[in-house]
Image (spheres, grey):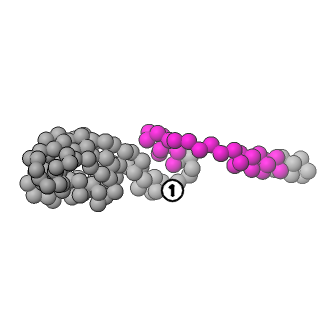
Amino acid sequence: MIASAKSLYKAKISLQIKRLIMKDTIISEKDAVKEMKRINVDPYGIKIMKDKAVFRNLLLTNIRSPMANILKEQMLSEGGDAAVHSLVISCKVEYSDVLLMGTLAQYKKVIEKMKLQPMEGREIAKRIEKLL
């Protein structure tokens, strides 16, 4: 029993030392799910969070200014963002390239919203889906 108590004590001390040694790091997108499993995240939680761990910058070209404005607003409403020509807001340019910045989870929501938009909304949704 004494030997068992000593090994238990050593294991406890070892665990405490490991906790004291911080190993903060940046995790790649491809390793995010692996780390969630290592941390012992609930499988349902992993399913919910995996798309939040993947960030993508997408470039859409030649988007009409009204649609660029709508797309930017949709991205902002989901927590992403979109970079557009400075004159898009006033529609003083007819077209703009749009740099979208967001996670897969955000894009999925924006795609559904864009499918409901008039004009080229569905086409833009398809273009985003194709890039992802």
Residue 130 lies in what quarter of the image? Answer: top left
Q: Nearer the viewer, residue 120 or 66?
A: 66
Looking at the picture, how far across and down is residue 104, in whole percent?
33, 48
Few, some or many C-alpha atoms within 10 Å of disc 1 (few <14, some 14-19, many ≥20)? few
> 124 or 61, which lies in front?
61
Residue 128 visible to the viewer:
no
Q: Nearer the viewer, residue 32 or 5?
A: 32
Q: Which residue is mark 1?
A: 42
Give, as a single range, the part of the protein colored magenta.
Answer: 9-36
Res 32 visible: yes
The secondary structure making up most of the magenta span is helix
* 81 with respect to 30 (left or right): left
Residue drawn at x 14%, y 55% as measured from the top left: 90
How many numbered badges does the structure rendering display?
1
Callout 1 secondary element:
loop
Q: Is residue 91 magenta?
A: no
Q: x and y percent of residue 77 in the render?
A: 29, 60
| Residue found at the very far right of the displayed protein | 2
Q: Name the residue: 42% across, 53% down.
A: 49
